[in-house]
Image (tube, rainbow, N blue to C red):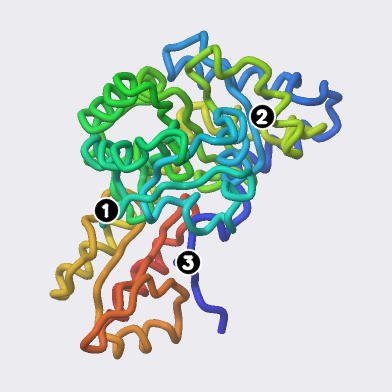
Amino acid sequence: MTKYSFLDDYSEGCHPHILEAMITSNFDQEKAYGQDTHSLQAKAKIKAHLKNNAASIFFVASGTLANLIIIASLLRPHEAVIAPSRGHIAGPEAGAIEALGHKILTVESPDGKLTPDQIEGVLQNHAHVPHMVKPRLIYVSNATETGRIYSKAELKALSAFCQENALLFMLDGARLGSALASHDNDVTLADLSDLTDIFWLGGTKAGALIGEAIIINNWELAEEFEIHIKQRGGLLAKSRLLGLQFNILFENDLFFEAAKFANSQAQKLSKAFLEKGYTLLSPTQANQVFPIVPNTLVARLEKDFDFYIWQSREEDQSVLRLVTAWATDPTQVEAFIQAL
């Protein structure tokens, strides 16, 4: 019997509305390299949410590609990135940023967040010019790798600190849909456009087949950005594939509704673990659940379900990571709960 997967939020293909639009428009002739009607319409819809017509928007195929293109374009050879130790660029991207020649200065952070005080410590430790790399870019993700979200006040504090210290502020939005749809969230896309220099919207984990939208709020950083995309192999001839998906995602707020559904399934799982007397590594705010359970239960659950062992603990316990998605089957969520 095939196991049901809670490993990630990209096991399925794409939302049926996107697939239907792909089929319907398949034989339409479109301009290449981002000049197609779908991309132009998608950018207009996103800008309406940003409340910033001056923002520049670029579509690329993957999150790692978004991160490395952004960082390659923003930093000079001697400049470095400050990131949480669990930040995606610091681990699961195979050293992509280091391969560019830029050092990642990591900060230990149990919840995956950064604070101005933490960043200040890194700046002080790298003030011995010219013998050390120069911190220049602050990297955060929302939601974080541990499923936590930033409040508007936290982002405001980071933004103000960056401005005071001539730092660039970047936000990785692989799961930004789930963060914005969280019951704890008080941040909007317009806020992000105002508070960050650059961020990106994750489409792959929000119902797209592939695709992320890079949003540059600082016009100076956007100058000739397409050249960086081209040099890194990210400028698709058939860019309609990416533009069409975001056009559909931002039609009738599908992007937010899909994320809201994913979050609701995560909340069901989270509630069930708590009701059974188990604890969580961190509160469930988006679409990731991190329960701490005995290994005897892990062995039983693994018979029918796939999930990650996030951490192994003493006393025969493990921290699991369960991820829900726009396409998560509610009946499988119930089956998982019944197996607890």
Q: Amino acid at mark 1?
A: Asp
Residue drawn at point x = 59 percent, y = 58 percent:
94
Q: Earlier in the sequence, mark 3 or mark 1?
A: 3
Circles 2 and 3, Cβ within 8 Å, touching? The answer is no
Q: Residues within 10 Å of mark 1 (few under 14, many from 20)?
A: some
Q: Residues within 10 Å of mark 3 (few under 14, many from 20)?
A: some
Mark 1 → mark 2, Cα distance in angstroms: 33 Å
Circles 3 and 1, Cβ within 8 Å, touching? The answer is no
- Depth-wise, is mark 1 or mark 2 nearer the camera? 1
Relative to 35, 45 lies left or right = left
Residue 220: x and y, percent? Answer: 55, 13
Q: Secondary structure at mark 1?
A: loop
Relative to 145, 314 lies left or right = left
Q: Secondary structure at mark 3?
A: loop
In the picture, which quadrant includes the C terminus? bottom left
Q: Amino acid at mark 2?
A: Gly
Q: Earlier in the sequence, mark 1 or mark 2?
A: 1
Residue drawn at point x = 27 percent, y = 26 percent:
161
Q: Amino acid at mark 3?
A: Leu
Total marks in image: 3
Q: Earlier in the sequence, mark 2 or mark 3?
A: 3
Circles 1 and 2, Cβ within 8 Å, touching? The answer is no
The residue indicated by pointer 1 is: 111
Is 2 in front, or is 74? 74
Relative to 63, 229 lies left or right = right
The residue indicated by pointer 3 is: 7
In the picture, which quadrant includes the N terminus? bottom right
Residue 192 lies in quadrant: top left
Q: Secondary structure at mark 2?
A: helix
Is 108 in front, or is 339? 108
* Residue 243 circle label: 2
Residue 30: x and y, percent? Answer: 82, 23
